[in-house]
Image (cartoon, rainbow, N blue to C red):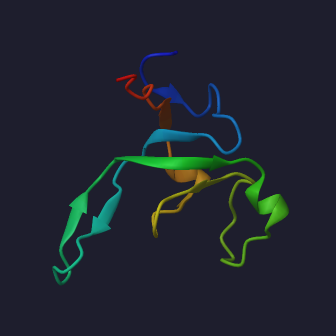
Amino acid sequence: MEAGWIPIGQRLPQDGQRVLCWIPGNEVYLPGKTGAMESRPAVILRFAEDFFVKNPSRTGKPTSAHFWLGEGTSNQFFEAVTHWMPLPEAPTT
């Protein structure tokens, strides 16, 4: 397994692969706290190759054919992610 962050311009994950992604400036709302936000540049996302080829975008935003599927409401446009890395192997015990 590779170690370290992989730039998206160098190589992409496999279609459907869950990976740790780096999203500079990513902020999320904190539940139960009015208007409170927290910086979370590293998140787990699933790579969706050619997502917008199969599902045309209704946002009107020009974007890549690829997309990052999140858990909950954390989906990201392809361009938002700069680097990714494989998730570590699961424990064996």
Residue 66 lies, with reference to residue 22, above or below; the image says below
Q: Residue furthest right?
A: 54
Picture quadrant where residue 3 is located: top left
- Towards the viewer: 32 or 93: 93
Residue 19 lies, with reference to residue 33, above or below; the image says above
Please provide percent x and percent y for residue 37: 22, 68
Residue at image coords 31%, 65%: 28
Taking the image as shown, residue 16 lies to the left or right of residue 28, namely right
- Towards the viewer: 70 or 26: 70
Taking the image as shown, residue 42 lies to the left or right of residue 80, namely left
Residue at image coords 18%, 74%: 36
Q: Residue furthest front?
A: 93
- Towards the viewer: 90 or 54: 90
Please provide percent x and percent y for residue 73: 46, 70
Taking the image as shown, residue 15 lies to the left or right of residue 56, namely left
**Quarter of the rendering occupied by the C terminus:** top left
Residue 32 lies, with reference to residue 14, above or below; the image says below
Residue at image coords 83%, 59%: 53
Residue at image coords 51%, 49%: 45
Please provide percent x and percent y for residue 58: 71, 78
